[in-house]
Image: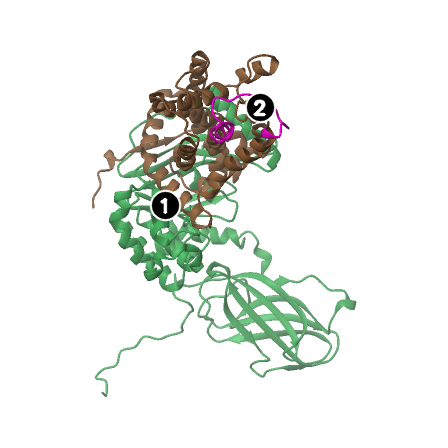
Chain colours: A green, B brown
Amino acid sequence: MVKIPEYEVITPSLQPLGDNVLLSVQGVSKKFCRSLKRSLFYGLQDIATELTGSRRRSAKLRSKEFWALKDVSLELRRGEALGLIGVNGSGKTTLLRIISGLIKPDTGSIRIRGRVAPLIALGAGFSPVLTGRENIYANMSILGLTTREIDRRFDEVVEFAEIGEAIDAPVQSYSSGMAARLGFSCAIHTDPDILLIDEVLAVGDVKFRSKCERKLGELRKQGTSFVLVSHAFQGILNVCDTAAYLSKGHLIASGDANSILAQYEQDLFSIKSDRSSIPFVLPEKPAAESAGADLISVYFRDSQGKLIESPISGESTYFCVKCRAVRKINTLSLFLAIYQPTRDNCLALHMSSAYDRETFEVLPGEHELRVYMPCLGLLPSSYTMNVYIKDGSLYTMDAHESIRFTVQGNDKLNRGMFYQQREWQVLQSPPF
Amino acid sequence: MPRQDQYLPEVLYTPESRLRHPIQLFREMGRDFLASRDLAWRLMVRDISSQYRQSLLGIFWAFAPPIVSAIGLTLANNAQIVNIGETSIPYPAYVMFSMSLWQTYVEALNGPVQAVSAAKPMLAKINFPREALVLARLGQVFFNFGIKLILIVGLFLFFQIPVTPSVLLAPVALLHLIALGTAIGLWLTPISALYEDVTKGLTLVIGAWLFFTPVIYPQPTEGLFATLVRLNPVTPLLVTTRDLATQGIIADPQGFWIASGIAIIGLLVGWLVYRVTMPFVIERMSA
């Protein structure tokens, strides 16, 4: 293994930023400490070195420290929208905090042109006993506006927040949605050059959310750049055209939002690396724990009955469950619930043979219980499935949750909610 | 609205100590100081109005402490429980006036520490000129002193204490007293934001400090205690403020200027300390 020479903090050469580049992150690392006591002590140490002006050996880890960010480099141009994705603790928020100048990097440098507005904390500095009006002034000055600038934007802010008459009521009487709307409205009306958004778009109701997205779109047209942190895939795709994927502090990939999201999704559900996931073989249960029938495995078949690893959108497919009955069961039924983690884990499909009034009478032994779908309506994506076998519709005999699988597609058809089987036609001289 | 990117202000963040580029640092400090006036005013208005809006008795709370201690001490003095000695002005007025000055000093000292601890959530999430927090607290200190001034003027009228033109110089000495408090506060702020011990220790120290300052008694002239009181940097500043307002003489000009020097240099260095250490403090308080 080649040892990388340990480097002292290098003063970056100050070349002019490239055309239209508003934000340039070069080799930025940041370390954190897992123990609070030590962290505070290191803080004291850092303060002492900073005050004596000596060089911090910031490129080296001290005991119990880890890299929350390691060698991350990014660029953001005017009007560009960058999505930061990664699981919790991958360093997204840390990166945003370094960009906004709240904390110093341990290596590397960050150069920023123009005003940065953080939509990290909505309504920072809101005092609950003061009125909405007073809080707008306080909040917007914290965000860096002068009184005259606030005066000019005041009406717009109130109108956007849809606060109306309540503007002169104390903020503690606001609903949480109203307060969040007011905070969002204040932040977005500061005319930033770079807007940092940390999973705050989930405020308010659907109507307000779409209004926010429209406003963000408008700002982008005017040349505002965005850095957006989100778990929600749809949110990133709606706003961003490029994305950067962080994992454990490392920048794994960056580029076109669609392909980066696809990579993230694959890693997240580790489907590629774990090929044996389907057929999904369940651990065997001791006979004493059996409630009458046990799940053995879960798998898919195509229309010819051939085993397939992942079903394909629009094709005829069998979802099969192998189970062992230890006694005679009069009304064996199968429940399948399929969730989509990339869409806030929403229920994509729910099927129950008992609800369809189809139950089976089986003798002790192994059986394959399956549902035939002439045309699979699930879109290409990752899913998790919960499987239940029941006696009747209530008595659960065995269950297994969160079985991961992917649905493939013949075309790129990941828009919309489900796959619709169709034929396109044209009629000559329609009758009416 | 098309913007000319090359004219936009550019910021650079690196791991290097900012003290290595002092000229740039001083320029930034100056810029942020100017930029923070507006915000400081807003924060001050916000804090004062929310404070008074949630209070029924309002400014009574600014008057109450000096009045209560004056009543208690006067009773004790009259009953010969404590032996205070002769004061230049009637004792109740002496205590109330001195207590107001002492309180102003303590408020200035606690200001930066409390401001940072109250603004923690804001500090952790928004990059605004950190000076604004301290300036807003200073504004509150002046506001509170302004209220106490009503009490002091009332006292002077009631006890018919003569004033000389030198009373106009008293605010200068008062400013130095506030500067000393703020300086110490700024020095303590980074550590107090990390460790709670500072806040606890501060309460203890301030309680004891009062007894080494001629607030409830006139300045002693001999003995070990007198030396201790004289070495206390608050003594010359507080006594000079009081003397200028009531007698028109400065008893210890040398001590006053030394203490003032400490206060003003301490304030400037404290500002520097506060400024360069804030990112480290923020990193640790919400990591």
Side (left or right) of A335 relative to B234: right
* Residue A61 in view here: no
Give the residue at mark 2: B84
Quadrant of residue A110 within the rendered picture: top left
Element type at mark 1? helix
Residues rendered magenta in the picture: B78-99
Q: Are marks 2 and 1 on the same chain?
A: no
Q: Amino acid at mark 1?
A: Ala
Percent position of residue B196, x then y = 58, 35
Give me the disc on residue B63.
none
Q: Is residue B83 magenta?
A: yes
User: Which residue type carries mark 2?
Assistant: Ile
In the rendered image, which residue does mark 1 sit on? A138
**Residue closest to the eye, B94 or B34:** B94
Residue B217, x across and y down, in percent: 55, 23
Q: Residue at x 52, y 23 (%)?
A: A48
Mark 2 vs mark 1: in front: 2
Q: How many marks?
A: 2
Chain letter of disc 1 in the image: A
Q: Percent x, y for residue B240?
A: 44, 20
Say above or below: B110 vs A55.
Answer: below
Residue B100 belongs to magenta span: no
